Amino acid sequence: MNEILNMSMNEMAEADFDCSCGRHHSLPIKKIAIGKGVLQQLPEVAAEFKGKQVYMISDNNTWKAAGRNAHELLVNHGFKIKSYMFETGKEILIPDEAVMGRVLMEMPLDTALIISVGSGTLNDMGKFLSSRTGIPYIIVCTAPSMDGYVANGAPLICGGRKISFVATLAYGVVGDTDVMKDAPMHMIHAGFGDVLGKLTALTDWSLAVEINNEYRCDTCVKLVEAGLKRCIDNAAALKERNEDAILYLIEALTLTGVTMSIVGVSRPASGAEHMLSHYWEMDFITRHKFPELHGVKVGIATPIIAEVFEILGDDIPEATRDLMPKREFVEALLNSAGAMVSPKEVGIERELFHRSLLEAYTVRKRYSVLQYAKEKGRLEEVAQKITERIYGA
């Protein structure tokens, strides 16, 4: 029971065990290869599809980071590949209806395997395409920037709104730290922000257990906490692109994805901090503004949600109070890694910020501290206090 607690990251592929939470968990991902130099293992990970049509998608940045080498490796090992690269220049790729339509139009009819080379957006596109076609996909990770590499949700833009579609899990994950340590520092900061979001996500999960008797798997909590601790202990080394720090970061992100996959919900990874991030992103996209990286916004939102818990204080159930992170602690971690801390740094104006605290709980049907504050009649108070601290009276 709980064998997964004793497994290395790469051993977790196809994990299958009875859990102390009373449920049976399994992870259907066939191959996980994370570590130094593991891009060379891509032909082995994809071996089942040799001789069949492979469809590789990337953008101009991820092609340079790993796509060209991945393509050459597979061709040299006798794989049949069609590659399509999105040319985005210096802009980010927005996974909206037009982009998803294009990636489908470029896919060969006899495709047997999809390979996405990238991080958040390209991974989401690959898993969504995989889920709708029934064709397995492999993700070649290019940045330790988010926790969705082994999760089955695919957040895409539809009708101007960010919607998390149910998708599918990857057949295989290849995450080479030699590639990821050279990712733009902004993307490393995004991954670190996404990891820190677990501090408030786990607290939110505890609150939902206390208030609504929601299901929680403590084995998953332990996995996330273990990865989180290694990241926190090595936060300052991220600025130096330290290989161990990058490895701990991608392992923490991947562990969180594993926990989401085995419990079937994103509770281990996502709470009110993600609701704020999604609210800001949808507003920016509607106004045709650069939406900023998901994890950067999650990192900024995490100390804010920590402050919500602090303001509510004794109104929070005792079991949850024991888990509450301090705002100053989270901000210090972000500063130590050189990451953004204030919503003002990413262009969030006072009115949007105040409104987001009042309305972000509506972004998805998930119980959070924001919903709890509203039920206690204190959401306006919380929003006003935090807005005035950041933007002035």
Image (spheres, rainbow, N blue to C red):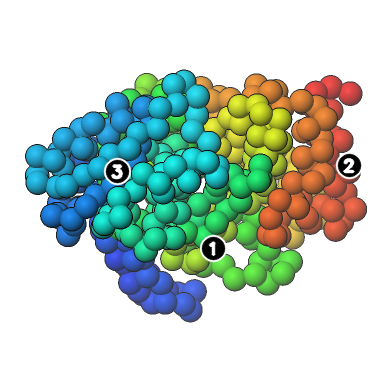
Q: Earlier in the sequence, mark 3 or mark 1?
A: 3
The residue that appears at 30% across and 55% down in the rendered structure is: 109
| 3D distance between C-alphas at marks 2 and 1 | 31 Å
Type of amino acid at the residue the image marks with label 2: Glu
Structural distance between the alpha carbons of marks 2 and 3: 50 Å
Q: Is residue 114 left or right of residue 197?
A: left
- From the viewer's perspective, tell me whether residue 324 is left or right of residue 169: right
How far is disc 3 from disc 1 in space, using C-alphas?
A: 28 Å
User: CB atoms at circles 3 and 1 under 8 Å apart?
Assistant: no
Q: What residue type is labelled 3?
A: Met
For residue 56, the mark is 3
Rendered location of residue 105, percent (x, y): 40, 46
The residue nearer to you, when weighing 389 against 118, is 118
Q: Name the residue under label 1.
A: 265
What is the crowding at mark 1: few (fewer than 14 residues within 10 Å), some, or many (at least 20)?
some
Residue 357 horizontal/vertical position (percent): 78, 41
Helix, strand or loop status at disc 3: strand
Place residue 328 in its image quadrant.
Answer: top right
Of 265 and 130, which appears nearest the observer?
Answer: 130
Residue that badge 2 annotates: 381
The amino acid pointed to by label 1 is Val
Q: Nearer the viewer, residue 362 or 33?
A: 362
How far across and how far down the image is residue 78, in percent?
9, 46
What residue do we see at 88% from left, 43% from top?
A: 380
Element at badge 1?
Answer: loop
